[in-house]
Image (spheres, rainbow, N blue to C red):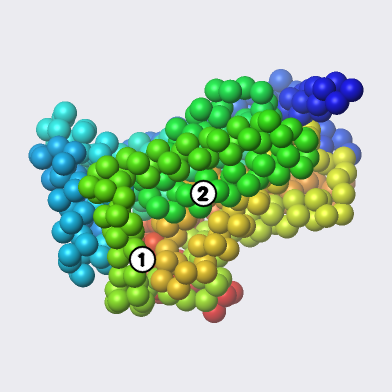
């Protein structure tokens, strides 16, 4: 009887993908007609292509930030000396107090691929690093399209793509030699695999992919452990609490353990031993408190990151808040006709849980409040922005007495205007003024939206 119950529950999760959300008790027209499906596909594909083109053609910067110069130096050393260069760089990092203000040399998941491409192509580190960031940003947008196609209503899917296509933070990172660009798509990949595990936990391949992506993420930046931990906790809740599946929950624990252990082994090998690796991580954390840049530009109250999001795009932030609050309200007070199939709804709750938890954790350390440090949450953030836009469209349709096509057209026109404004904000901040980081002081003083900074 227990096995039959689990199989029935599994079929409910898997068939939920075909159930589309309703609007005011009726289906949204775009999901019911061939014309609507074609329109959604055309808009989504066009938006992705525009976003990819903007990322691949975005202008270069005049001056590189100190972090970028450090990454290029690390990659150049590894490209020239081989893997043994990591140990030398780690020893120098531990001995130099000034070096501790900057990225660690044991972030093998980013530095080693960068060095490998440099060595094979013969191209300099700056050029390779910029193209890695550009391609990573395109992959993140593509993964949002995949996740949206899997779990979002059509209108939410389009809205999320429109807002992320011209995201000031994403476009800014696409021009820089930062590991935060690749982390965006690695975080998106982990989100996608987590959602697929929740849908079909009997498929072993997703656990393997989850472990590989998690290990790569942890080896790219130390905060990857937090990202894996949050998604792992959500999966354990789904499998152990909601589905009573102890075996698959243990598979998740095993995948997480493999990811973290593999990353630690590779980084320790690069540093020259586990003791040296611990020293590097410890010195980096301690060094931040003596870094004048961090104490001046990356400090602030707990809402600093939320305010940063707002100054990048107030409409996107407002839609994300609407989406998160609506999901929380539905979870607490029950579901209705406008909730999709079970596993799609579960994916929305998973994205909300991850985003809120990650932002809270990232807001606690005193000198780490930088929007690029939370790039792993970008795809979850924009997926929730899309859900918020979808809710606004539904409410507007109800106010217009069921003329949903008119409501849809109005919201899309507004989103187009928002997208133009967000691109102008990016151009003002990072092209004209050449700001070299995603920190609040720059946004508060130079964002075109500073006039509506309600957090002041």
Give the position of the N terminus as an image quadrant: top right
Q: Which mark is residue 285?
A: 1
Q: Quadrant of residue 357?
A: bottom right
* Horizontal arrangement in the rendering, residue 143 relative to residue 435 (left or right): right
The residue shown at (36%, 66%) is 285
Pick the front one: 52 or 396? 52
Please report whichever mark, 2 or 1, sits nearer to the chain's N-terminal start. 2
Instruction: Tell me the element at label 2.
Output: helix
How many residues crowd around disc 2 within 10 Å: few (fewer than 14), some, or many (20 or more)?
many
Location of residue 444 with respect to 417 vertically, above or below: below
From the viewer's perspective, is residue 1 above or below residue 306? Answer: above
Name which residue lies at 65% across and 45% down: 234
So how many labels did they put on this image? 2
Answer left or right for 388 relative to 209.
right
Please name the residue shown 55% across and 53% down the image.
418
Image coords of residue 36 (percent x, y)? 70, 27
Look at discs 2 and 1 and give the one toward the viewer: 1
Label 1: which secondary element: helix
Q: Position of residue 178 (x, y in %)?
A: 31, 51
Q: Does residue 197 appear in the picture of this structure?
A: yes
Which image quarter: residue 404?
top right
Cα separation between marks 2 and 1:
18 Å
Residue at image position (25%, 65%) is 100
Q: Quadrant of residue 18?
A: top right
Of the pair 95 and 143, the residue shown nearer to us: 95
- Say whether residue 452 is left or right of residue 442: right
Look at the image and tell me whether residue 60 can be seen.
Answer: no
* Residue holding disc 2: 227
Asked if residue 376 lies left or right of residue 391, the reply is left
């Amino acid at each position: 009887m227990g096995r039959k119950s689990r199989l029935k529950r599994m079929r409910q999760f898997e068939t939920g993908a075909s159930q589309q959300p309703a609007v005011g008790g009726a289906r949204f027209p775009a999901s019911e007609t061939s014309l609507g499906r074609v329109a959604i596909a055309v808009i989504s594909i066009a938006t992705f292509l525009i976003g990819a083109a903007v990322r691949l053609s975005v202008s270069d910067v005049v001056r590189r930030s100190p972090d970028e110069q450090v990454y290029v130096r690390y990659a150049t050393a590894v490209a020239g000396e081989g893997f043994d260069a990591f140990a030398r760089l780690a020893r120098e990092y531990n001995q130099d107090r000034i070096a501790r203000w900057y990225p660690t040399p044991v972030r093998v998941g980013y530095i080693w691929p960068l060095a490998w491409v440099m060595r094979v192509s013969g191209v300099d580190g700056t050029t390779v690093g910029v193209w890695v960031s550009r391609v990573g940003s395109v992959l993140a947008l593509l993964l949002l399209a995949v996740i949206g196609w899997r779990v979002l209503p059509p209108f939410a899917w389009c809205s999320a793509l429109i807002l992320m296509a011209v995201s000031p933070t994403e476009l800014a990172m696409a021009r820089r030699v930062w590991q935060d660009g690749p982390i965006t798509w690695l975080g998106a990949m982990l989100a996608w695999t987590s959602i697929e595990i929740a849908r079909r936990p009997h498929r072993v391949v997703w656990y393997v992919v989850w472990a590989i992506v998690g290990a790569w993420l942890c080896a790219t930046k130390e905060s990857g452990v937090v990202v894996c931990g949050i998604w792992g906790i959500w999966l354990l809740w789904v499998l152990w609490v909601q589905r009573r599946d102890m075996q698959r929950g243990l598979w998740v624990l095993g995948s997480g353990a493999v990811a973290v252990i593999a990353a630690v082994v590779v980084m320790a090998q690069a540093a020259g031993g586990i003791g040296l690796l611990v020293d590097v991580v410890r010195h980096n954390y301690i060094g931040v408190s003596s870094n004048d840049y961090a104490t001046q530009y990356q400090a602030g109250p707990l809402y600093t990151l939320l305010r940063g999001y707002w100054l990048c795009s107030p409409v996107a932030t407002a839609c994300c808040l609407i989406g998160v609050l609506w999901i929380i309200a539905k979870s607490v007070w029950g579901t209705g006709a406008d909730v999709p199939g079970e596993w799609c709804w579960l994916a929305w709750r998973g994205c909300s849980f991850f985003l809120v938890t990650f932002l809270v954790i990232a807001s606690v350390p005193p000198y780490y409040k930088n929007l690029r440090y939370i790039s792993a949450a970008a795809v979850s953030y924009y997926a929730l922005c899309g859900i918020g836009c979808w809710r606004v469209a539904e409410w507007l349709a109800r106010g217009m007495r069921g003329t949903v096509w008119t409501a849809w057209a109005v919201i899309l026109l507004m989103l187009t205007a928002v997208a133009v404004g967000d691109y102008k904000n990016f151009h003002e901040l990072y092209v004209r003024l050449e700001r070299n980081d995603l920190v609040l002081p720059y946004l508060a003083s130079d964002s075109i939206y500073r006039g509506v900074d309600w957090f002041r």
